[in-house]
Amino acid sequence: MGKYERDKGARGERDLRDKMKEVMGWKEVERTQQRCGNAGDEDVRVAHLPDLFAECKWVEALNVVAAMKKAVSQCKGKLPVVFHRRSRTEWLVTFRLADMPRFLAVLSQPMPPEPSDPTIEPPSSSASSHATSSRTV
């Protein structure tokens, strides 16, 4: 694989990561190759969906069957899902029909609650309700 194809793949993974955040509202989505670089890992990882194996393909002529076979062979028991698109088109999602119940179950997992910011103190009720202003003339 040449540099252009690698760069296009990395751009596709970043674009998919950003779309997952935008469309699904998922906060913790990352490219795994930039984080650990392990071949065989999913291309994009959603932190609160550890059972999802996301294979990302940004190609003009995708062999969907071959892409799914690759995802199945690498998923290590996770749910293999192929996210794919052509240039200037929207993302599509492919998974096996037999995996649909599992796919729906994985997607229904709740997102973890937002952590509270320990550096921000809650407003004091007495300070805000008894605010006074002084003006000199």
Image (cartoon, helix red, strand yellow):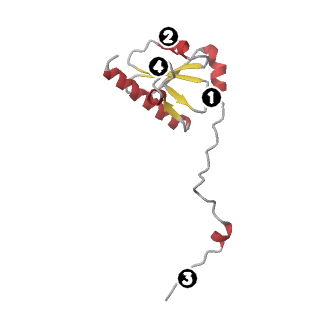
Mark 4, mark 1: which one is toward the viewer?
A: 4
Seen at 64% across and 39% down, the residue is 112
Whether tag 4 and tag 1 are in contact, CB under 8 A, the answer is no
Q: Give coordinates of residue 29: x percent, y percent.
A: 52, 34
Whether tag 3 and tag 2 are in contact, CB under 8 A, the answer is no
Q: Residues within 10 Å of mark 3 (few under 14, many from 20)?
A: few
Q: Which circle's residue, 3 or 2, is located before the other in the chain?
A: 2
Q: Which residue is mark 3?
A: 134
Q: Which residue is mark 1?
A: 107
Q: CA distance from mark 3 to mark 4?
A: 67 Å
Mark 2, mark 4: which one is toward the viewer?
A: 4
Three-letter amino acid code of the residue under disc 1: Leu
Quarter of the rendering occupied by the N terminus = top left
Whether tag 2 and tag 4 are in contact, CB under 8 A, the answer is no
Three-letter amino acid code of the residue under disc 2: Val
**Residue found at the far bottom of this picture:** 137
Seen at 49% across and 10% down, the residue is 65
The answer to which of 52 and 59 lies nearer the viewer is 52
The answer to which of 96 and 109 lies nearer the viewer is 109
Q: Which residue is mark 4?
A: 39
Q: Give coordinates of residue 78: x percent, y percent.
A: 60, 20
